[in-house]
Image: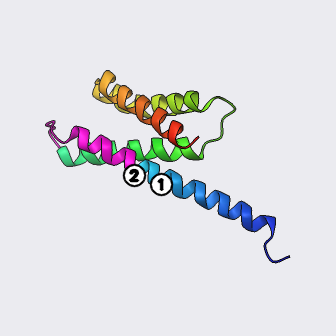
Amino acid sequence: MLLSSKYFVTIYYMRTVTNGIIAGILLGIVDVLLMMPLSFPDKKAALLGAFINRFAIGFVVVNMNLPVPFWVKGIVVGLFLSLPDAIITKSYIPILGTGIVGGLLVSFFTK
């Protein structure tokens, strides 16, 4: 047999990982663009931290398999990955809002 099932499983997981990377980069860029007009004591660190957090949300939403509807997965991942940043900065609504909406959008477009 020229193409085994192992080949197709590998292709499936590579496609999922690639989609997660793309979703994470896009979500990270959107969040950084939303934060650009704001002022921070260390703007470079704030933007980098936001990008990494949103990248993680996009990557995890695509690659995590939960036995719940897609929209629940997006909301839960967005909430839990955004919660530490929101607690540290005490800026709950904007951080949790963009995390939850971002997770929901990624889960919707990759369902």
- Coloration of the structure image: rainbow
For image coordinates 59% across by 33% down, the residue present is 70
Give residue 2's quadrant in the image: bottom right
At numbered mark 1, what does the secondary structure look like: helix, strand or loop?
Answer: helix
The quadrant of the picture occupied by the C terminus is top right
Magenta stretch in the rendered image: 26-42
Q: Where residue 106 is drawn, which disc sits there?
A: none
Is 44 drawn above or below residue 104 in the view shown?
below
Callout 1 crowding tier (Cα within 10 Å): few <14, some 14–19, many ≥20: some
36 left or right of 67 in image = left
Tell me the SS state at disc 2: helix
Is residue 83 or residue 73 the one in the foreground?
73
Q: Position of residue 87 (x, y in %)?
A: 35, 25
Q: Position of residue 40 (x, y in %)?
A: 16, 38
Whether tag 1 and tag 2 are in contact, CB under 8 A, the answer is yes
Q: Is residue 39 magenta?
A: yes
Instruction: Locate the N terminus by quadrant.
Output: bottom right
Q: Is residue 82 magenta?
A: no
Task: Tell me if mark 2 has few (under 14), some (14-19) or many (20+) residues whose alpha carbon lies within 10 angstroms of its own.
Answer: many
Whole-angstrom CA distance, mark 1 to mark 2, is 6 Å
Q: Is residue 85 above or below residue 57?
A: above
Mark 2 residue type: Ile
Q: What amino acid type is highlighted by mark number 1? A: Ile
**Is 26 placed above or below 10 here?**
above
Residue 48 lies left or right of residue 11; in this view the side is: left
Q: Residue at x 59, y 59 (%)?
A: 15
Which dot marks residue 25?
Answer: 2
Give residue 21's mark.
1
| Residue farthest along the bottom direction in this orientation | 2
Image coordinates of residue 52 in percent, x first then y, are 37, 47
